[in-house]
């Protein structure tokens, strides 16, 4: 293939569905200062240059534009950011996370601080897809759901579980980067008014 990718990176299937049982453990080990016991890993191919995708993602305050459950990401200085995220039953959870690895055009990694409502850590990697097909964007997340397994079940019922959200958020990121907008089934006020006339 002629790339500098590791065997794990050459596979674009999510780490959680790999037939290689060591792949999930290896992916978790790539996260610096890991926090959490539940592993989520998803990959999407986006037909844009990886530097452009990295630059957009690295402006963390923009993430709510395509991350459905993220209300806001506020810079606190020193590579620390306060995250406010929707939770089940109309609630929100907050945490402060620090960027632990930042290689322009390649990877962004983070870990939450000790008092986080949802302990988490992860990384987003940007790799050239084979055959000039754009960029593989891989999000790997370790997290501890509030209230343990019960909290995870409740989050799934309300469609707020991170495994569900990572897949959806990557799909929306792809739409935004390739088309300039995120497709939605919701009508804008202008569309609704036009239909009513």
Image (cartoon, rainbow, N blue to C red):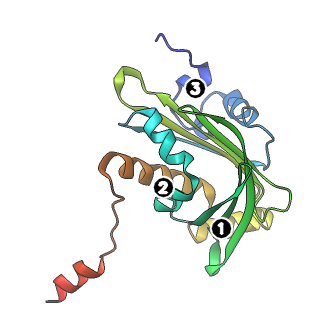
Question: Residue 71 occupies which quadrant of the picture?
Answer: bottom right
Question: Residue 50 occupies which quadrant of the picture?
Answer: top left
| Camera-nearest residue between 195 and 167 | 195
Label 2 and label 3: CA atoms lie apart by 21 Å
Total marks drawn?
3
Q: According to the image, label 1 marks what residue? A: 84
Choose mark 1 or mark 3, whichever is in front: 1
User: How far across and how far down the image is residue 30, in percent?
Assistant: 72, 32
User: How far across and how far down the image is residue 44, in percent?
Assistant: 46, 40
Residue drawn at point x = 67 percent, y = 41 percent: 109
Q: Is residue 153 visible?
A: yes
Q: Is residue 160 visible?
A: no
Which of the two discs, 1 and 2, labels the residue nearer the N terminus? 1
Label 1 and label 2: CA atoms lie apart by 18 Å
Residue drawn at point x = 35 percent, y = 66 percent: 184
Residue most toward the front? 77
Q: According to the image, label 2 marks what residue? A: 168
Choose mark 1 or mark 2, whichever is in front: 1
Residue drawn at point x = 76 percent, y = 33 percent: 29
Which of the two discs, 2 and 3, labels the residue nearer the N terminus? 3
Label 1 and label 3: CA atoms lie apart by 30 Å
User: How far across and how far down the image is residue 45, in percent?
Assistant: 42, 37
| Camera-nearest residue between 127 and 153 | 127
Q: Which disc, if any, is residue 9?
A: 3
Q: Which disc, if any, is residue 162?
A: none
In this rendering, would 118 be left or right of 23?
right
Crowding at label 2, few (<14), some or many (≥20) Cα neighbours within 10 Å? Answer: some
Compared to residue 45, the image places residue 6 above or below, namely: above
| Camera-nearest residue between 168 and 50 | 50
Residue most toward the bottom? 197
Q: Quadrant of the C terminus?
A: bottom left
């Amino acid at each position: 293939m002629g790339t500098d990718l590791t065997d794990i990176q050459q596979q674009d299937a999510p780490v959680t569905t790999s037939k290689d049982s060591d792949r999930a453990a290896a992916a978790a080990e790539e996260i610096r200062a890991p926090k959490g016991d539940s592993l989520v890993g998803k990959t999407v191919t986006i037909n844009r240059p990886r530097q452009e995708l990295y630059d957009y993602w690295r402006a963390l305050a923009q993430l709510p534009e395509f991350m459905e459950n993220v209300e806001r990401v506020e810079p606190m200085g020193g590579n620390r950011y306060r995250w406010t995220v929707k939770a089940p039953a109309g609630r929100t959870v907050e945490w402060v996370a620090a960027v632990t690895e930042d290689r322009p055009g390649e990877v962004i990694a983070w870990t939450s601080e000790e008092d986080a409502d949802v302990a988490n850590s992860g990384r987003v990697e940007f790799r050239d897809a084979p055959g000039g097909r754009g960029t593989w964007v891989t999000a790997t997340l370790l997290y501890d759901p509030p209230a343990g397994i019960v909290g995870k079940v409740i989050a799934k019922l309300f469609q707020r579980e991170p495994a569900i959200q990572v897949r959806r958020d990557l799909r929306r990121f792809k739409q935004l980067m390739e088309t300039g907008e995120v497709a939605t089934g919701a009508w804008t006020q202008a569309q609704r008014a036009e239909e009513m006339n």
